[in-house]
Amino acid sequence: MNIAKIDLNLLVYLDVLLREGSVTKAANHLSITQPAMSNGLKRLRDVFKDPLLVRTSDGMTPTKRAAELQPIIRDVLSKLESAIQPETEFTPQTSTRTFRIMASDYAESTLLLEVIRRLSVFAPHITLDLITPSDVTFHDVEQGRVDMAINRFEELPLSFHQKVIWYDSFSCVVKSDNPIVKQFDLNNYLGSRHIWVSKTGFGVGVGIDPTEVQKLGWVDAELTKIGKKRDICVFTRHYHVALQLAKAQSLVATLPSKAANLYKNDPEMVILPPPFDIPPIALKMAWSALLQHDAGHIWLRRLITDIGAELS
C-alpha cells in the first residue's frame, strides 16, 4: 500500500488506542468525539487488514499484529515529535527542572546517593523526586509522567528504552560475634535464621507466602536447585532494615554486594561470600520513548550511566 494514501493521523489514533485500551479513553485523550475515534479504528482495521483491538472479558485487548505494531509506531511518532520541537539546549548549572525517578531501595542506597551528590555540584537547582516502585505503574513511565525507573527488572515493555547500569554479585552480612563466622559453610548457613529482601517491581505490592519458594527470588531459587531451603523469619522491602536486623538480631542477610558494602566499615558486622553460587543481577535504567530525545533527560541519563560505571 502506498503510504501517501494513508492519513498519518491514524497512527496517532492507533498509538493512543493501544496505550489506553479503550475507545472512550482514547477519544478523551485526543479531545475528539467517541464516534470519530470509532471511525478511526474502523479505518485502521481496513489499513492493516486486522481487528487490532478485540473485546474480551478484560476489555479491549490488542491482537498479535497490534502488539507487534505498538513499539514501531511509538518509535516513529517519538522521532517525529522530536523533529518538530524547537531545538533547545539544556544547561544543568541553571536548570530548575524536577526529575521524577522510580527507584528501588537498593538503587537509592547504592547509586542515587552519589547521583544526588553530583547534582549538588553540577546542577544545584535541579530537584529529584524519588518514588517507590509500588507508587507507579509501567503506564506512568510509558506516558512520561515518571522520567525513569531504576530497578532490577525481569521483563520490560517493548516500547521502553533501557540500559544496564551495572551487574552485582551477592554477599552475606552477619554480626561479627555470630558463631557461624568461624565456619561459614552451607550447613551453618542453612542452620541460621534469615532476612529476605524483596526484588520490588511495579505496582501495589502483595504479601509473601513463604511456602511459594519459586516466587521468593534469586537466593531461594538457587537453593531450590540444590534441594535446600533456608529458614526465613523476616520479610522486608528495605535493605537498610535487613542490615539493621542482621546487626541487632544476629540474623543472616543475603543481598546484593553493593548494598552489603554499605556496612563494610562497621566493626560489628562481617561481609562474607555466600556458601553457594548465586548468579549476578542487573540494575537497569528504563525510560519512555517520549523522553528519548529530551536534552535534559539525555544529560541525566549520561550522568547516571557514568556514575554507575565508576561505582562498578
Image (tube, rainbow, N blue to C red):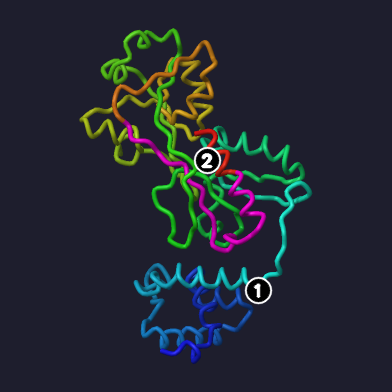
Compared across the picture, whether 85 is left or right of 125 comes to: left
Q: Magenta span has 302?
A: yes
**Disc 1 to disc 2, C-alpha distance:** 35 Å
- Tell me the crowding category of disc 2: few under 14, some 14 to 19, or many 20 or more residues within 10 angstroms, Cα based: many
Indicate whether 171 appears above or below 78: above
* Helix, strand or loop for disc 1: helix
Residue 84 marker: 1
Closer to the N terminus: mark 1 or mark 2? 1
- Residue at x 38%, y 23% (from the top left corner): 194
Instruction: Name the residue type under label 2.
Output: Ser
Instruction: Name the residue type under label 1.
Output: Ile
Whole-percent x, y for residue 121 in the image: 73, 37
Residue 104 marker: 2
- Residue at x 38%, y 81% (from the top left corner): 51
- Residue at x 56%, y 33% (from the top left corner): 109
Whole-percent x, y for residue 189 in the image: 32, 19
Whole-percent x, y for residue 263 in the image: 52, 20
Residue sitting nearer the eye, 235 or 167: 167
Residue 173 marker: none
Compared across the picture, whether 20 is left or right of 155 comes to: right
* Helix, strand or loop for disc 2: loop
- Residue at x 54%, y 33% (from the top left corner): 110
Residue sitting nearer the eye, 36 or 69: 69
Q: Magenta span has 263?
A: no
Indicate whether 207 appears above or below 226: below
Q: Residue pushed farthest bottom?
A: 5
Write the start and end of the magenta stretch as one range.
278-303
